[in-house]
Amino acid sequence: MLLNYGFAREVGYLRYIIRRILWRIAPPASITLPTGMEFLLPKEKVFSADVFVTEGNLDWNAEYILIAFLKSLPERGDFLDVGAHIGYYSALLRPYVSRIYAFEPDVRNHPFLRAAFSSYSNTEIIPEAVADQPGSIVLCQENESSISHIDPAASSGNYVPVTTIDEFCARREVVPSAIKIDIEGYNILAIRGASGTAQRHSPVFVVEYNQDEQRPNTWEALQAFALEHRYNVFAASREKIFPMDYQYTFRSFDAPGLAGLDIKMLFLVPQKHKAWFDRFVEQSGNWTNKDLRRPAVRRMIA
């Protein structure tokens, strides 16, 4: 049994070991997430074990900050789940949005998404990649489907259809209030392809933090988008405070100020919603790993 020290600190070492053993002996078919939604846990997926062990808190509260924000809106908007994998974010956010569009180009994930969404009337699987130009693009299928990724530089391979957020939203008349992007270091391509959507609808973006030198994400590109569209960058940074504890600090950053920090997810926040995030920073901007556990999460989204 490999020990994920980050998850172990977040969950608590004893509880982590117990839940890892339980998963190994008799993995459950599903888990009830803190939002009350049932989420299927296909045992073939490493990701399922992570959801089970953390009881549905993988991104240091980012998913629940997003839920708290969505609950504050006077009307429900649509949600774009770009890089849906097996539907974790889509399942979490279903009670708080109007419609969900789950973008997943890796066909190996589609049976799990269909099973997960079989009883969801407001969720649609979009079997396309997302980038900055529509057409087709090579998908590199890794052994673990959670880290499959597009490769715009490839001239041969497994081609899949690709769209842009702007093209999709215009064609389908989608009005997103939130967009999650987790496409393994190619997030900036999806963000660039959402310039018109950012201008017209001012959605909040929740974006995986990934600065792999072999991928196109850069501080300069992120900062350029933020400045051009009057977006603000918020994130939770993590640091050790005791041998077995973490401290998390959620605040606003200039994009270059993120360098060297331990960060998992970024929030790109339009000016019209900045006041809500500023209030969150003031009231709830610091927490420890103990606040990632279910009782504290439920209080956050109550």
Image (tube, rainbow, N blue to C red):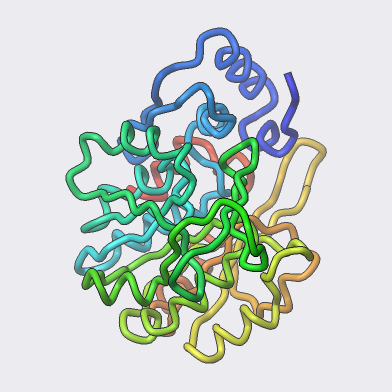
The residue lying at 23 percent from left, 57 percent from top is 99
Outermost residue toward the bottom in this view: 228
> Is any part of residue 199 visible from this angle?
yes
Relative image position of residue 79 (x, y in whole percent): 33, 60
**Residue at (78, 48) in percent of width and height:** 240
Q: Could you say which is closer to the camera, residue 98 or residue 34?
A: 98
Q: Residue furthest front?
A: 156
Q: Extreme top residue here?
A: 25
**x then y, percent, for residue 244:** 76, 36
Q: Left of 139 or right of it: where is 261?
A: right
How many numbered circles are shown? Answer: 0
Q: Where the N terminus falls, by quadrant? A: top right
Closest to the observer, 286 or 255: 255
Q: Tell me: residue 186, above or below residue 104.
A: below
- State left or right for residue 208 relative to residue 218: left
Is residue 282 shown to the viewer in this render? no
Q: Is residue 298 above or below residue 70?
A: above
The residue located at (73%, 76%) in the rendering is 257
Q: Nearer the viewer, residue 125 or 197?
A: 125
- Report the residue at 29% width, 64% height from top: 72
Position of residue 248 measured from the top left corner of the image (x, y, whole percent): 65, 54
Residue 168 rendering spot, x and y as whole percentages: 32, 70
